[in-house]
Image (cartoon, grey):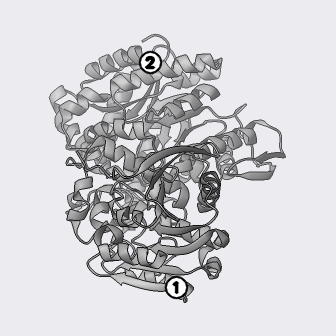
Amino acid sequence: MAGNARFDFIHFMHYVHLPENQKEFRSLWVDFPNKYFDPEKGHSLYQRYLSELVLADTLGFDAIVVNEHHNTAYSLMPAPNLIAASLIPQVRNAKICVWGTPPNLEYPNRLAEEYAMLDVLSQGRLEVAFPLGTGMEYWSNPINPSTARARYRESIDIILQAWTQDGPTTYYGDFYTYRYLNPWPRPMQKPHPPCYIVGTGSPETIDIAAQLGFGYASVFVTKQRARELNEKLRRTAAEHGHHIRPEQLPLQVITYVAETEQKARDEGIDHIRFFFEDALRTTPTFLAPPGYLSVEQLKMRAALADKLHGAFNFDNVNESFFVAVGTADQVVEKLEQWGEQMGTNHFVMLAAPGNMPNWKVVKNLNLIAQDVIPRVRVGAPYERRVAAE
Amino acid sequence: MPAQPIPAQFKRETHTVNGVKTVVLTAGKGEPLVFLHGAGIWHGLNFTLPWTEKFRVIVPFHPGFAESGDDPAMNDMHDYVMHYLDLFDALGIAKTRLVGFSLGGWMAAKFAAEQGHRVERLVLVAPAGLRGKERPKGDVLSLPPEQIPSLLVSNFDVIKPYLPENPKDLDFMGERYREGGTLARLLWEHPYDTKLPRYLHRLTMPTLLAWGEDDKLLPMQTAELWRRHLPKAEFKTFKGAGHLVLDENREAVDAVARFLS
């Protein structure tokens, strides 16, 4: 791999203690009864998951990544900034990535404030992403899905204005009026923390990233589609005068490393199955609230939905998505190949997939840190290289 | 192939109303009768045919539904009132008999409250728009699309011919999704109008309220809410009919015709 590679560890913090009859529920999102949440078990999971994120920092990962979902056993992070804040004192070197709060689900000035707080608290180690939010978030929050994209766009404008223009400023928009946009504190990084758009490849989100020169992380799209999206972003961004650097195209890889390929499969696949079959299980209606997608996108996604949310087949998943389950040699080879194809050197390791127990996550992180990262990452770690620039 | 929902008697005209493509169907001769359809008209218009014997029946497709165009800026029921003011001006309709069903009933009630002098007689058929105490079953946005048809009728055979054989028919699914988006713009935040009760006293024209006794979407309790706000309105209920009372019960169609004559 040419240049320096960057390795992030992303944690979804699933609530894994599901009831015996969980398969009878059509969705673990939106309407999955919250009586199944046990706060004692939740406490233990938070302790455990935070320790895994801290371990990744200790082992030399470049960044740790958290994100936001609502009304779901998929995630214990409806408020990821709380997780980020609690990690900052323990995570000493890695960047803190909140990828992130859908900016249209929160008052934009408040989100600008919270992110600025995290950036100052972490001494400039924050990175943020602006997801539109899955369809499921719109069933769980009082925001109209039919204006989601317009509100999203306006919210990003307000946040950038709050960060980059000396206040007080004013903003008179379609959704928000600010007579005094003047948030304290302001971010440490100038002009603002690195920003990404996270999306599933709708043309609108790609265009926003291209206009603003943001990074773009496509999630839950096939390998082929992800490659097309990266190419499209580079091309469209160039039209707007932005050069997209490889590290702006984070590539999310479901990873499990073990001593042999068979052992990796034996130890890993069941948890990847849980991720696809259970954690992601939801309904077409929840995925696409009215007005959230164009009619064309709805039709296009009807096919992919079966692949993503239907019956699990590891070979299909392995073929369609970025999945690296095997020996360190095999994982290194895949990452180098995908990095080349996708034009990126930024790998987001989904290294705690599904209901994987702590010992496997610890083993996985250790093997990735010892046997994968040093071989893909040429020269100094990403963190130090950036600091030296 | 689903049955052809629009009877051959209807003539089709396309108007551009304040920039929005608006398709208007017309059949029959006589005084005008405007029918404002519900949140989808895939179940057809055959029930309107008896009215065409006495009236010039005018059925505009609402913006964002069926053959009319989309306008994302129309995100309030008042926008539809203004749309129909423009359309009636374009059609030269100074005053009309107005029949509204479900979403169209809400629209008709709001139109009549604001523009009473243009409404000769008003018929509200299972209108949406008021907030009941019970969890609103009428919140169609929260229902999976495949569950909606069976909630509309008492006798499923009435609408079966209009549904595609394959429940995953992409075109049908896409059309309903588009209309769902129109509905979301109108009523995602509130699937009812909190201000409407305040102004219903303005419905001073002769008014008929019609309801199917087996309505599963807007059950009969909702009718009681309307009656409380419209004490002078005539109230008729129909047996063996669900929400699509006009499609299911010919007596309801005839009662509307008699009331409007």
What amino acid does circle 1 point to?
A: Ala
What amino acid does circle 2 point to?
A: Arg
Task: Determine whether, in the image, residue A153 is placed left or right of residue B124.
Answer: right
Determine whether the residue tagged by mark 2 lies in a helix, strand or loop: loop
Q: Nearer the viewer, residue B21 or B227?
A: B21
Relative to residue A86, is residue A324 depicted above or below?
above
Q: Quadrant of the N terminus of chain B?
A: top left
For the point 66% across and 43% down, the residue is A154
**Residue B132 locus on image (x, y percent):** 48, 79
For the point 64% across and 63% down, the residue is B94
Determine whether the residue tagged by mark 1 lies in a helix, strand or loop: loop
Task: Determine whether, in the image, residue B252 is placed left or right of residue A139.
Answer: left
**Residue B166 locus on image (x, y percent):** 21, 47
Task: Determine whether, in the image, residue B139 is placed left or right of residue A118.
Answer: left
Mark 2: few/some/many CA within 10 Å (<14, 14-19, 20+) = some
Write down the quadrant of residue A315 in the picture.
top left
Q: Nearer the viewer, residue B135 or B157?
A: B157
Q: Name the residue that disc number 1 marks.
A: B233
Between circles 2 and 1, the one closer to the viewer is 1
Mark 1: few/some/many CA within 10 Å (<14, 14-19, 20+) = many
Chain containing the residue with disc 2: A
**Residue B182 locus on image (x, y percent):** 50, 52
Q: Name the residue that disc number 2 marks.
A: A377
Q: Nearer the viewer, residue B160 or B143?
A: B160
Write down the quadrant of residue B194 in the picture.
bottom right
Relative to residue B6, is residue A320 depicted above or below?
above
